[in-house]
Amino acid sequence: MTITSKDDSPATELLVKKIADLREQIAHHQHRYYVLDDPEITDTEFDSLFRELQTLEEWNPELKDPNSPTVRVGGAVADRFEKVQHLVPVLSLANAFGEEDLQRWRDRLLRLLPEEEHARLAYVVEPKFDGLTVVLQFEDGRFTLGATRGDGETGENITPNLRTVHQLPLRIPVPNAGGHSKMQPPRRLIVRGEVYVEENDFQLFNQEQARKGERTYANPRNFAAGSLRLLDSGVTAERPLKLWTYQIFLEEGLEHPPGSHWDSLEHLRAYGMPVCDESRRFSDAEWEDLIEFVGSWDELRIRLPYDLDGMVVKVDLLSQRDLLGFTGKDPRWAVAFKTGGEEATTRLLDIGVKVGRTGAVTPNAVLEPVQIGGVTVQAATLHNADYIEELDIRIGDIVLVKRAGDVIPKVLRPVKKLRDGSEKPWRMPAECPSCSQRLERPPEEAATYCVNNACPDQLVRKLEYFVSRGAMDIVGMGSRQADLFVSKGYIKTLADIYQLPWEEIEKIDGYGEKRIQNLLHAVDESKSRGATRLLTALGIRFVGNVVAELVMAEYDTLQELMDADLEALSDIEGVGPKIAEAVVSYFNLEPNRALVQSLADLGVSLANPHQEREVKEDSLPFSGKTFVITGTLPTLSRAEAKARIEAAGGRVTGSVSTKTDFLLAGEKAGSKLNKAQQLDVPILGEQDLLQGAELGK
Ligand code: IVH
């Protein structure tokens, strides 16, 4: 083509027509591609049209047009943004947190609208897009001004940047959009929209920026806002910005202006604007369905490639909106629905299993990271195999996750309707992930166990517990050391903590002399923690600090406890048969007895430290005497009786044995009374205690 003349020759006319034609074609194809997601030509064909137009415009600068599709690549550089006064105030939205709030919003509508309007009341529910609000102005079909919201009255002119957003039509109506090709453009159209970025595009951008050592953004919303406010529109053009339009502020010069929001969305589509297809219309009679739809936003959010900030519920009829009006800056006819934010849905990427210190193998969820109440969650508990089976949770499912306070988040249920068939059911593995021994599941239990005492993971967990603050409290020993020393083979049983090969450890990176000394000192010091702490540290099922204390009040040393029988243990108040059973079966196992013996051989104390009190209070009436209380006393509560005994230097324990000096019995005394009688333990009544002092002698 050799069209270079600038006069009015037929060649120029042809050129003008050619350029107009190309612009129209390109606008059409951009709309098909970016708005309808349904291209008619290949990228190569499109590129060739685009380049042809670019070349013609370059050769003929006088035929340039600010709304030519070629401006999408940006170029204009500003040194600041000009302020623009909005022709229509850009209002904000009130929030409704949860169903009840939403119900109250509807009640108010019904109160405010005259009775005869109720039958026509209808709503449109649409996603609340999480981006930057923009105001777009078109005059005689041409995009003339684009601004930020600002304070609602004055915004900033960001027209050149907005021109680079592919989904924004620069001329309306876009040829053939929505089949309304003969539609006349309104004299003036002002539209509200939201510029946003898809989650994926955001991640890719940030990764690339990080790789180049350049600025990254906190979230897609900041990214969108930041990109729109760049002074160089050429840079904005490279950002993956997208647009939704959802409100007409002004549509002048139409013979039949839309009467409802639903219709105005149709208008927007017909002009070639991007309008989200997820919106739904409900009559007031369908309120229950509306509630259900609104409640499913969290699921919708997973399905969509961009993030939502809730849902917006709007009165559909524009005439009713006028009747309802505003409170402050918020229209009464619309409300943003949001949930409390304690729960969220995300994808279950995998299910891992972890061996605990008791050998219990528990499944846990590996999640696609999700924000719940301001915290990123990527792991959650799945309890046990039954839980997974009963709820039919599958790998690949979208799951509802709950986070409450600081407790471990949990998976509540799968969202089954979002399945696409690729989800995989999960089974508890047959073998331990750590030691490959067969796992066992006791008949009446929900948990599965690795019963291998030498299982490395189990040992690491046992160690972590053994050295923890409530147990042997070995400062400087933690998960890291447990892992390291087990994997190096230095620790094979808990007792090995007290015979670590320190010369070897000294060779490990990061274990200098000072550190070794501190560790050694802490290990040594822990030897005298005493029987109660040691019993806790062993990690017997159901035996924590409190139970250990109750139990060790009855026995002088762990050695003695090892030989205690079931009956004596169950008699201890606060212990009972279940715990007694756990303790007895623990000490019935030879390796456990051997462990306690090795600990003792290595210098770990099996007795509780002597209480100074005993010595000091030697002179008190009940010093050195052990009491058991049973039944209901006439006036004193058990706590009061106990306090009196202790004040007089005595000790109160839970079960009657040969070591019991007195049984304090009230009404309805049971087995303890029998036992005391069998053992010839003197039996006292409350009166004896109250008169008490002489008894100790
Ligand atoms: S309607 C006067 N619909 O949310 C009522 N707003 O918190 C006009 N937003 O900045 C708002 N998606 O721009 C409406 N589908 C939607 C929306 C939406 C996002 C923005 C809105 C405003 C913010 C209010």
Image: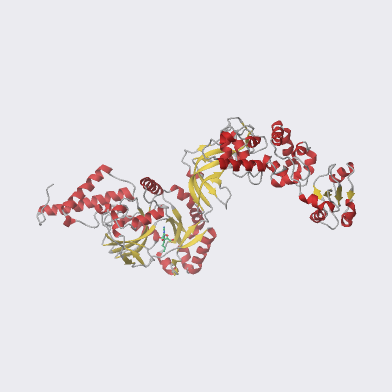
**Can you give x and y, in whole percent of width and height, for residue 270 in the image?**
32, 55
**Figure coloring:** secondary structure
Can you tell which quarter of the image residue 675 is in?
A: top right
Task: Looking at the picture, tell me which residue is in the foreground, 487 or 640.
Answer: 487
Compared across the picture, whether 235 is left or right of 298 comes to left
**Can you give x and y, in whole percent of width and height, for residue 344 in the image?**
51, 50
Specify the farthest residue to the top. 437
Vertical side of 467 occupied by 313: above or below: below
Look at the image and tell me whether residue 369 can be seen: yes
* Ligand 1 shown in quarter: bottom left
Vertical side of 690 occupied by 540: above or below: above
**Can you give x and y, in whole percent of width and height, for residue 166 in the image?**
31, 52
Task: Looking at the picture, tell me which residue is in the foreground, 446 or 582.
Answer: 582
Look at the image and tell me whether residue 195 can be seen: no
Vertical side of 469 occupied by 263: above or below: below
Task: Looking at the picture, tell me which residue is in the foreground, 413 or 639.
Answer: 639
Can you tell which quarter of the image residue 511 is in?
A: top right
Q: How many marks?
A: 0
